[in-house]
Image (tube, rainbow, N blue to C red):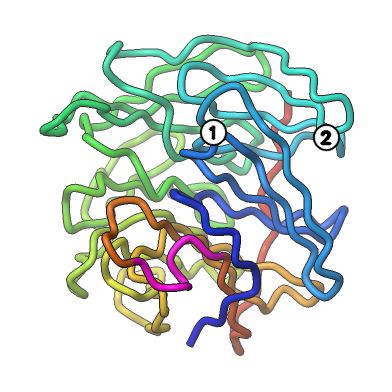
Amino acid sequence: MFEIIEKSEDMLGECPIWCPRTHRLFWTNILGNELLAYAPGTGVRGRWPLPERLASFAFTARQDVLLLGLASRLAFFDLATGVLTEIGASPGNPNTRIGDGRCDREGNFVFGTMHEGEPQERVGAFYRLNAQTMTIESLALPGVAIANSVCFSPDGTTMYYCDSLQPNIFCCEYPSLEHQRVFADVLGGGAPDGSCVDADGFLWNAEWGGSRVVRYSPDGRVDRVIASPAIQSTCPAIGGHSGDILFCTSARVGLSTPTDADGALLAVSVTGANGMHETCFAG
Protein backbone atom coordinates (compact mmCIF):
# COMPACT_ATOMS: atom_id res chain seq x y z
CA MET A 1 0.00 0.00 0.00
CA PHE A 2 1.19 3.48 -0.84
CA GLU A 3 1.95 5.91 1.96
CA ILE A 4 1.72 9.70 1.95
CA ILE A 5 5.18 11.31 1.86
CA GLU A 6 4.18 14.87 1.00
CA LYS A 7 0.79 16.43 1.76
CA SER A 8 0.96 18.89 -1.09
CA GLU A 9 -2.86 19.03 -1.55
CA ASP A 10 -2.50 19.31 -5.33
CA MET A 11 -5.75 19.88 -7.15
CA LEU A 12 -4.26 17.94 -10.07
CA GLY A 13 -0.83 16.46 -9.41
CA GLU A 14 0.81 14.89 -12.47
CA CYS A 15 3.97 13.86 -14.32
CA PRO A 16 6.36 12.76 -11.53
CA ILE A 17 9.94 12.31 -12.77
CA TRP A 18 12.93 11.29 -10.66
CA CYS A 19 16.05 13.41 -11.17
CA PRO A 20 19.20 11.30 -10.64
CA ARG A 21 21.43 14.38 -10.71
CA THR A 22 19.81 16.13 -7.76
CA HIS A 23 18.11 13.10 -6.14
CA ARG A 24 14.76 14.84 -6.17
CA LEU A 25 11.34 13.96 -7.50
CA PHE A 26 9.81 16.67 -9.68
CA TRP A 27 6.12 16.87 -10.53
CA THR A 28 3.46 19.38 -11.50
CA ASN A 29 0.30 20.66 -9.88
CA ILE A 30 -1.48 21.45 -13.13
CA LEU A 31 -4.35 23.54 -11.79
CA GLY A 32 -2.04 25.35 -9.39
CA ASN A 33 0.22 26.56 -12.24
CA GLU A 34 3.31 25.28 -10.46
CA LEU A 35 6.26 22.94 -10.68
CA LEU A 36 7.17 21.09 -7.48
CA ALA A 37 10.14 19.09 -6.20
CA TYR A 38 10.75 16.93 -3.14
CA ALA A 39 13.91 15.27 -1.80
CA PRO A 40 13.03 12.03 0.02
CA GLY A 41 14.88 11.59 3.28
CA THR A 42 15.64 15.26 3.72
CA GLY A 43 12.18 16.69 3.19
CA VAL A 44 13.63 19.57 1.17
CA ARG A 45 10.97 21.07 -1.06
CA GLY A 46 11.02 23.20 -4.17
CA ARG A 47 8.21 25.20 -5.73
CA TRP A 48 8.23 27.30 -8.91
CA PRO A 49 5.13 29.34 -9.90
CA LEU A 50 4.38 29.45 -13.62
CA PRO A 51 2.28 31.77 -15.81
CA GLU A 52 -0.09 28.99 -16.87
CA ARG A 53 -0.90 25.33 -16.35
CA LEU A 54 1.96 22.87 -16.67
CA ALA A 55 0.93 19.37 -17.76
CA SER A 56 4.24 17.67 -18.58
CA PHE A 57 7.96 18.33 -18.76
CA ALA A 58 11.38 16.79 -19.39
CA PHE A 59 14.87 17.30 -18.08
CA THR A 60 17.54 18.60 -20.46
CA ALA A 61 21.33 18.34 -20.63
CA ARG A 62 21.48 21.48 -18.48
CA GLN A 63 20.70 20.59 -14.89
CA ASP A 64 18.79 23.78 -14.12
CA VAL A 65 16.83 23.92 -17.39
CA LEU A 66 13.63 21.97 -18.07
CA LEU A 67 11.50 21.62 -21.18
CA LEU A 68 7.91 22.46 -20.21
CA GLY A 69 4.64 21.40 -21.82
CA LEU A 70 2.49 24.34 -20.75
CA ALA A 71 -1.17 24.59 -21.65
CA SER A 72 -0.64 26.80 -24.68
CA ARG A 73 3.04 26.31 -25.59
CA LEU A 74 6.33 24.49 -25.22
CA ALA A 75 9.09 26.40 -23.46
CA PHE A 76 12.43 26.06 -21.73
CA PHE A 77 12.43 27.04 -18.06
CA ASP A 78 15.49 27.99 -16.01
CA LEU A 79 14.99 26.85 -12.41
CA ALA A 80 17.68 29.20 -11.11
CA THR A 81 16.49 32.40 -12.77
CA GLY A 82 12.83 31.71 -13.50
CA VAL A 83 13.32 32.75 -17.13
CA LEU A 84 10.86 31.17 -19.58
CA THR A 85 11.95 30.86 -23.23
CA GLU A 86 9.14 29.95 -25.64
CA ILE A 87 9.76 27.23 -28.25
CA GLY A 88 6.42 27.00 -30.02
CA ALA A 89 2.66 27.25 -29.57
CA SER A 90 0.45 24.25 -28.85
CA PRO A 91 -0.51 22.73 -32.20
CA GLY A 92 -3.84 21.48 -33.45
CA ASN A 93 -7.38 22.30 -32.37
CA PRO A 94 -7.75 25.65 -30.55
CA ASN A 95 -10.05 23.98 -27.99
CA THR A 96 -7.27 21.72 -26.75
CA ARG A 97 -4.31 22.15 -24.43
CA ILE A 98 -1.02 20.29 -24.08
CA GLY A 99 -1.30 17.25 -21.83
CA ASP A 100 0.83 14.23 -21.04
CA GLY A 101 4.30 13.84 -22.57
CA ARG A 102 7.85 12.60 -22.15
CA CYS A 103 10.99 12.03 -24.18
CA ASP A 104 11.53 9.06 -26.46
CA ARG A 105 14.83 7.20 -26.14
CA GLU A 106 16.41 9.47 -28.78
CA GLY A 107 15.67 12.58 -26.76
CA ASN A 108 12.69 13.96 -28.72
CA PHE A 109 9.75 15.21 -26.65
CA VAL A 110 6.55 13.31 -27.49
CA PHE A 111 3.32 14.77 -26.13
CA GLY A 112 -0.42 14.78 -26.58
CA THR A 113 -3.23 17.28 -26.35
CA MET A 114 -6.64 17.08 -24.68
CA HIS A 115 -10.04 18.63 -25.31
CA GLU A 116 -11.01 21.37 -22.86
CA GLY A 117 -14.73 21.44 -23.70
CA GLU A 118 -17.70 19.51 -22.31
CA PRO A 119 -18.57 16.90 -23.33
CA GLN A 120 -15.00 15.98 -24.19
CA GLU A 121 -14.49 15.03 -27.81
CA ARG A 122 -11.69 13.20 -29.59
CA VAL A 123 -10.09 16.28 -31.08
CA GLY A 124 -6.78 15.87 -29.26
CA ALA A 125 -3.73 14.38 -30.97
CA PHE A 126 -0.11 13.33 -30.48
CA TYR A 127 2.96 15.32 -31.50
CA ARG A 128 6.75 15.22 -31.32
CA LEU A 129 9.19 18.07 -30.75
CA ASN A 130 12.16 17.07 -32.90
CA ALA A 131 15.29 17.73 -30.85
CA GLN A 132 17.45 18.22 -33.95
CA THR A 133 15.24 20.60 -35.92
CA MET A 134 13.25 22.07 -32.97
CA THR A 135 10.06 21.70 -35.01
CA ILE A 136 6.77 20.18 -33.83
CA GLU A 137 5.73 17.15 -35.91
CA SER A 138 2.26 15.57 -36.00
CA LEU A 139 2.14 11.83 -35.25
CA ALA A 140 -0.24 9.64 -37.26
CA LEU A 141 -2.16 8.20 -34.30
CA PRO A 142 -5.96 8.22 -33.75
CA GLY A 143 -7.59 11.31 -32.26
CA VAL A 144 -8.14 11.32 -28.49
CA ALA A 145 -10.12 13.28 -25.93
CA ILE A 146 -7.47 13.06 -23.19
CA ALA A 147 -4.00 12.01 -24.37
CA ASN A 148 -2.23 10.07 -21.65
CA SER A 149 0.22 7.25 -20.75
CA VAL A 150 2.94 8.42 -23.15
CA CYS A 151 6.03 6.28 -22.49
CA PHE A 152 8.51 4.05 -24.31
CA SER A 153 10.00 0.58 -24.00
CA PRO A 154 13.61 0.44 -22.75
CA ASP A 155 14.96 -0.08 -26.28
CA GLY A 156 12.75 2.69 -27.66
CA THR A 157 11.03 0.53 -30.30
CA THR A 158 7.57 0.56 -28.71
CA MET A 159 5.45 3.58 -27.82
CA TYR A 160 2.60 3.33 -25.30
CA TYR A 161 -0.31 5.77 -25.12
CA CYS A 162 -3.99 5.99 -24.24
CA ASP A 163 -7.13 8.08 -24.31
CA SER A 164 -8.30 8.26 -20.70
CA LEU A 165 -11.93 8.08 -21.86
CA GLN A 166 -11.29 4.60 -23.26
CA PRO A 167 -10.59 1.55 -21.00
CA ASN A 168 -7.48 0.56 -22.93
CA ILE A 169 -3.77 1.24 -23.12
CA PHE A 170 -2.47 1.14 -26.69
CA CYS A 171 0.96 0.61 -28.20
CA CYS A 172 2.66 0.74 -31.58
CA GLU A 173 6.05 0.28 -33.17
CA TYR A 174 8.20 3.36 -32.85
CA PRO A 175 9.16 5.57 -34.59
CA SER A 176 7.27 4.06 -37.53
CA LEU A 177 3.92 4.08 -35.61
CA GLU A 178 3.04 0.84 -37.37
CA HIS A 179 1.09 -2.07 -35.84
CA GLN A 180 -1.13 0.14 -33.66
CA ARG A 181 -2.96 -2.15 -31.25
CA VAL A 182 -4.45 -2.61 -27.77
CA PHE A 183 -1.68 -3.34 -25.31
CA ALA A 184 -3.87 -3.92 -22.24
CA ASP A 185 -7.50 -3.63 -21.18
CA VAL A 186 -8.00 -1.64 -17.97
CA LEU A 187 -10.43 -3.70 -15.92
CA GLY A 188 -10.17 -2.32 -12.39
CA GLY A 189 -13.02 0.16 -12.59
CA GLY A 190 -10.77 3.18 -13.00
CA ALA A 191 -9.62 4.98 -16.12
CA PRO A 192 -6.05 4.72 -17.46
CA ASP A 193 -4.02 7.78 -16.54
CA GLY A 194 -0.24 8.28 -16.60
CA SER A 195 2.28 5.48 -17.07
CA CYS A 196 6.00 4.76 -16.81
CA VAL A 197 8.18 1.86 -17.92
CA ASP A 198 10.83 0.15 -15.80
CA ALA A 199 14.19 -1.23 -16.89
CA ASP A 200 12.70 -4.70 -17.44
CA GLY A 201 10.09 -3.40 -19.87
CA PHE A 202 7.10 -3.61 -17.51
CA LEU A 203 4.58 -0.78 -17.73
CA TRP A 204 3.16 0.81 -14.57
CA ASN A 205 -0.20 2.60 -14.95
CA ALA A 206 -2.10 4.76 -12.46
CA GLU A 207 -5.88 4.38 -12.55
CA TRP A 208 -7.94 7.53 -12.15
CA GLY A 209 -10.84 6.60 -9.87
CA GLY A 210 -9.47 3.09 -9.39
CA SER A 211 -7.41 3.62 -6.21
CA ARG A 212 -4.54 1.57 -7.56
CA VAL A 213 -1.45 1.31 -9.74
CA VAL A 214 -1.11 -1.72 -12.02
CA ARG A 215 2.08 -3.21 -13.42
CA TYR A 216 1.69 -4.87 -16.82
CA SER A 217 4.16 -7.35 -18.30
CA PRO A 218 5.58 -6.60 -21.77
CA ASP A 219 2.87 -8.79 -23.29
CA GLY A 220 0.08 -6.80 -21.60
CA ARG A 221 -0.82 -9.17 -18.76
CA VAL A 222 -1.44 -7.86 -15.24
CA ASP A 223 1.69 -8.62 -13.22
CA ARG A 224 1.11 -6.72 -9.99
CA VAL A 225 -1.52 -4.49 -8.39
CA ILE A 226 -0.67 -1.97 -5.65
CA ALA A 227 -3.55 -0.41 -3.77
CA SER A 228 -3.56 3.33 -3.22
CA PRO A 229 -5.33 5.36 -0.50
CA ALA A 230 -5.91 8.04 -3.14
CA ILE A 231 -9.12 7.72 -5.12
CA GLN A 232 -7.62 9.56 -8.08
CA SER A 233 -4.10 8.28 -8.79
CA THR A 234 -2.63 10.13 -11.75
CA CYS A 235 0.90 8.99 -12.68
CA PRO A 236 3.64 6.71 -11.32
CA ALA A 237 7.42 7.06 -11.41
CA ILE A 238 10.18 4.79 -10.14
CA GLY A 239 13.13 6.45 -8.44
CA GLY A 240 14.99 6.82 -5.20
CA HIS A 241 18.69 6.27 -4.63
CA SER A 242 18.40 2.54 -5.42
CA GLY A 243 15.70 2.80 -8.07
CA ASP A 244 13.20 0.78 -6.04
CA ILE A 245 10.72 3.40 -4.82
CA LEU A 246 7.45 3.75 -6.68
CA PHE A 247 6.11 7.29 -6.43
CA CYS A 248 2.65 8.35 -7.53
CA THR A 249 0.90 11.69 -7.86
CA SER A 250 -2.81 12.17 -7.22
CA ALA A 251 -5.61 14.72 -7.51
CA ARG A 252 -8.38 16.36 -5.47
CA VAL A 253 -10.25 18.00 -8.33
CA GLY A 254 -13.88 16.92 -8.64
CA LEU A 255 -14.04 15.17 -5.26
CA SER A 256 -16.64 16.47 -2.82
CA THR A 257 -14.95 14.74 0.13
CA PRO A 258 -11.31 14.03 -0.81
CA THR A 259 -9.18 11.88 1.47
CA ASP A 260 -5.86 13.07 2.89
CA ALA A 261 -4.19 11.04 0.14
CA ASP A 262 -5.99 12.74 -2.73
CA GLY A 263 -3.69 15.47 -3.97
CA ALA A 264 -0.73 14.09 -2.01
CA LEU A 265 2.55 12.65 -3.24
CA LEU A 266 2.58 8.93 -2.46
CA ALA A 267 5.34 6.32 -2.35
CA VAL A 268 5.93 2.63 -1.69
CA SER A 269 9.01 0.41 -1.78
CA VAL A 270 8.76 -2.19 -4.55
CA THR A 271 10.82 -5.35 -4.67
CA GLY A 272 11.80 -6.82 -8.01
CA ALA A 273 11.39 -3.54 -9.85
CA ASN A 274 14.31 -1.80 -11.53
CA GLY A 275 13.75 1.84 -12.28
CA MET A 276 15.31 3.50 -15.28
CA HIS A 277 16.08 7.18 -15.76
CA GLU A 278 13.89 9.13 -18.13
CA THR A 279 15.70 10.33 -21.24
CA CYS A 280 16.66 14.00 -21.28
CA PHE A 281 15.57 16.24 -24.12
CA ALA A 282 18.43 16.26 -26.63
CA GLY A 283 17.87 19.71 -28.10
> Mark 2: which secondary structure?
loop
Q: Say few, some or many: other residues with alpha carbon within 10 Å of mark 1 (under 14 / 14 to 19 / 20 or more).
A: many
121 vs 202: above or below: above
> How many marks can you see?
2
Range of magenta residues: 258-264
Which quarter of the figure is the C terminus placed in? Answer: top right
Q: Nearer the viewer, mark 1 or mark 2?
A: 1
Above or below 73: residue 194: below
Q: Is residue 158 magenta?
A: no
Front in this rendered view, residue 200 or 82 = 82
Q: Which labelled disc corresponds to residue 61?
A: 2
- The stretch drawn in magenta includes residue 260: yes
- The disc, 1 or 2, on the residue closer to the chain's N-terminal end is 1
For the stretch drawn in magenta, what is the main secondary structure?
A: loop
Question: Which residue does the numbered mark 1 point to in the structure image?
Answer: 54
Q: Quadrant of residue 123?
A: top left
Q: Residue at x 28, y 52 (%)?
A: 254
Q: What type is the residue that disc 2 sits on? A: Ala
- The percent coordinates of residue 144 (x first, y second) are 22, 34
Instruction: Give above or below for 161 relative to 113.
Output: below
Residue in view at x 78 percent, y 56 percent: 45
